[in-house]
């Protein structure tokens, strides 16, 4: 049950299995994951190193294909899709936020976002306006022409969030978005992601080890040894009760 009555399932994974490597050294990284992401929600995923978080994030983002199982993004099933088809689906419906920002150092903030829009087939004045609007939305309208070398870590992560927002993707996936930031900037980024997640046309999923981020979550999922080990909606239950190991 979601707090938001207007939310809907925008991404669904059913029975996701991922096997890496070749026999006899194969490793089953994911062992039957069932997961739904709902619009209007910030979901946090936690789990120890090696639990399968990054592999699952890559599958949900259409970077990897599952060995078994079914993934549906924005109503489109990925089963049987070619690499090109997956790439097109990813460009249209998925925005990524990386721990290391992944900004092009020779481009300004607005140019970094326009580059991402260009990959989605959008260019020219409209793309510039979209990029500028995305920077304004994350509080960086005044830094539109700044290069990454002139930005703080918090500012660079905000540009990365703006880049993920540009083009209005259905799902935003974040991999340890606070890991490279100090506490103040990290919590500012989480506040921004929580705000972004209120959009009833979008779902946000962030992988994190940072327990300070839990207060921002609408839903918390624990993954362990390639399986979903628990799920909690703290804003509905009045607290966080999952037994999660400290990191």
Image (cartoon, rainbow, N blue to C red):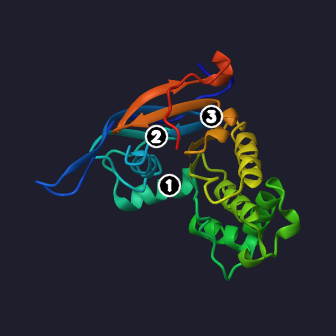
Can residue 95 be seen by looking at this rendering? yes
Could you say which is closer to the camera, residue 170 or residue 159?
159
Residue located farthest toward the bottom when viewing the structure as drawn: 106
Give percent across and percent down for residue 93: 56, 50
Helix, strand or loop at mark 2: loop
Spatial CA distance of label 2 from label 3 is 23 Å
The residue where tag 3 is placed is 39
Label 2 vs 3, first from the N-terminus: 3
- Crowding around mark 3 (Cα neighbors within 10 Å: few <14, some 14 to 19, many 20+) is many
Check the image and report above or below for 191 versus 155: above
| Residue found 68% across the figure and 25% down from its top | 6
Q: Spot the residue most to the left.
A: 24
| Residue 9 can be seen in this image | no
Q: Are marks 1 and 2 in contact (CB under 8 Å)?
A: no
Q: Is residue 121 above or below residue 222?
A: below
Instruction: Quarter of the image for the N terminus: give it.
Output: top right
- Rounded to the nearest whole Å, what is the CA distance between mark 3 and mark 1? 17 Å
**If you read the primary sequence from the N terminus, does the residue marked by circle 3 or circle 1 appear first?**
3
Tell me how far mark 1 sits from mark 2, CA to CA.
25 Å
**Residue wearing tag 2:** 47
The disc at residue 90 is 1
Residue 108 coordinates in the image, percent (x, y): 74, 76
Residue at screen point 81% across, 53% down = 137
Question: Which comes sooner in the sequence, label 1 or label 2?
Answer: 2
Q: Residue at x 43, y 36 (%)?
A: 223
Measured from the top left, where is residue 84 in percent x and y?
Answer: 40, 62
């Amino acid at each position: 049950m979601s707090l938001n009555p207007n939310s809907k399932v925008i991404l669904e994974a059913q029975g996701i299995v991922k096997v890496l490597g070749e026999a006899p050294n194969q490793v089953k990284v994911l062992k039957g994951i069932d997961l739904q992401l709902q619009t209007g929600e910030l979901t946090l995923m936690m789990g120890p190193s090696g639990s399968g978080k990054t592999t699952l994030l890559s599958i949900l983002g259409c970077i990897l294909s599952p060995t078994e199982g079914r993934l549906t993004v924005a109503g489109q099933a990925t089963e049987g899709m070619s690499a090109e088809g997956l790439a097109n689906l990813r460009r249209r419906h998925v925005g990524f936020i990386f721990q290391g920002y992944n900004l092009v150092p020779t481009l300004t903030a607005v140019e970094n976002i326009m580059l991402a829009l260009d990959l989605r087939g959008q260019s020219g004045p409209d793309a510039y306006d979209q990029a500028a609007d995305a920077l304004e939305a994350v509080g960086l309208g005044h830094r539109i022409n700044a290069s990454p070398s002139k930005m703080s870590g918090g500012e660079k992560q905000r540009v990365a969030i703006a880049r993920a927002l540009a083009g209005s993707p259905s799902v935003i996936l974040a991999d340890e978005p606070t890991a490279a930031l100090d506490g103040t900037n990290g919590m500012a980024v989480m506040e921004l992601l929580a705000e972004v997640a209120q959009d009833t046309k979008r779902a946000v999923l962030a992988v994190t080890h940072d327990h300070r981020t839990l207060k921002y979550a609408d839903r918390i999922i624990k993954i362990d040894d390639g399986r979903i080990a628990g799920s909690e909606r703290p804003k509905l239950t009045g607290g966080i009760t999952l037994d999660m190991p400290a990191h």
